[in-house]
Image: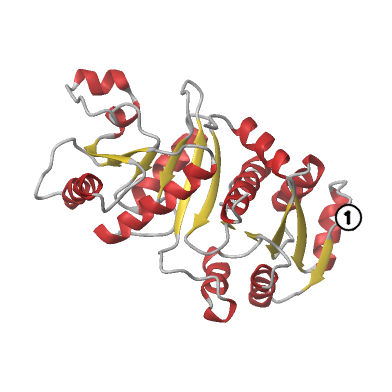
Amino acid sequence: MIKKFEEIVKHAQAIGPKTIAVAAAQDIDVLLAVNNAKKLGIADAILVGAESEIRRIALENQIDINKFKIIDQQDIVEACRTAVKLVATGQAHIVMKGLVESATILKAVLDKEFGLRTNSVLSHVAVADIAGYDRLFYLTDAAMNIEPDLQTKKQIIENALRVARALGNECPKVACVCAVEKVNPKMKATLDAAELVKMNKDGDLTGCMVAGPLALDNAVSPEAAKHKGITDPVAGNADILLVPYIEAGNMVYKSIVFFARGQIAGIIVGAKVPVIVTSRADSDIAKLNSIAIGVLMASKSEGN
């Protein structure tokens, strides 16, 4: 089981390069990330966007842009559609967001014309490497689903399981994170947590262990779980943190980055291919980590 981002990169190198189609590639952090991915042998890239801007940014940052194929497309919407089409036609394996709104690129991904939709919802999975912990955390959903209902939460968990398995965690422990550890009829998140636990026990949600409701402390800290008398094997040992709604996820995500100084990566799951959609505030290192995860997921979907 992969426990650190350094291991993710090494595994991606061992698999060999996949090709990324970058939509609106005129972004410094994205260009630095794909350039580093190329150097490390993780991925190649087709850069779709304003070619003059791409070349200017590359020149100013000593990036050898001539080793990448560039498709000049000034229009942002068409740049997204072109990048998605490259993946749909087998010319690339992964879609990546550049200097464009997430909604714009996701609209292209979901366009029936390209055939990348599945029956699953799209959801965001953040992978976090935090000092002091012996494992990676999978935080979901911090960026896509605003206030998911019970069935959507089930699919969000299933999407997170795909990421965890691509990183070698075959039976992740899932904590349904709430404000309290007991079911409260006035708190919908606790009711959903209890139902998700029941689905897991009944065999409707498989390949994982689910517990909840759990507060964040007793989801990740064995000491906190013991102090509160919680004996569930997931308590204190959770891998996947299912948040109740987007605000909670967003705050945990940014707390990891800015308070804990943790490493983080993000990926959209639920389409036929990995979609790398990172925050504009994320560094080029975070984008490189996201690329490495995308490579592992693309390889897993191909059965490698």
Q: Is residue 215 left or right of residue 171?
A: left
Q: Is residue 287 left or right of residue 238?
A: right
Quadrant of residue 217 within the rendered picture: top left
Where residue 67 appears, as percent x and y from the top left, is 88, 55
Where residue 208 appears, as percent x and y from the top left, is 35, 41
Which residue type carries mark 1? Lys
Where residue 221 appears, as percent x and y from the top left, is 33, 24
- The front one of 148 and 304 is 304
How is the rendered protein coloured? Answer: secondary structure
Q: Is residue 42 above or below residue 94?
A: above
Where residue 94 appears, as percent x and y from the top left, is 64, 59
Farthest residue to the left: give it: 185
- The front one of 258 and 111 is 111
Q: Is residue 12 left or right of residue 240?
A: right
Farthest residue to the bottom: give it: 113
Q: Is residue 47 above or below residue 136?
A: below
Q: Is residue 121 above or below residue 159?
A: below
- The front one of 289 and 295 is 295
At 70% from the left and 52% from the top, the residue drawn is: 30
- The front one of 303 and 154 is 303
At 40% from the left and 40% from the top, the residue drawn is: 252
Farthest residue to the front: give it: 303
Q: Can the viewer see residue 149 in this picture? A: no
At 70% from the left and 61% from the top, the residue drawn is: 22
Numbered circles on residues, count: 1
Q: Can the viewer see residue 176 in this picture? A: yes
Answer few, some or many: residues within 10 Å of disc 1's Cα (few below 14, many 20 plus, some between 14 and 19): few
Q: Give SS at disc 1.
A: helix
At 66% from the left and 74% from the top, the residue drawn is: 85
Give the residue at mark 1.
67
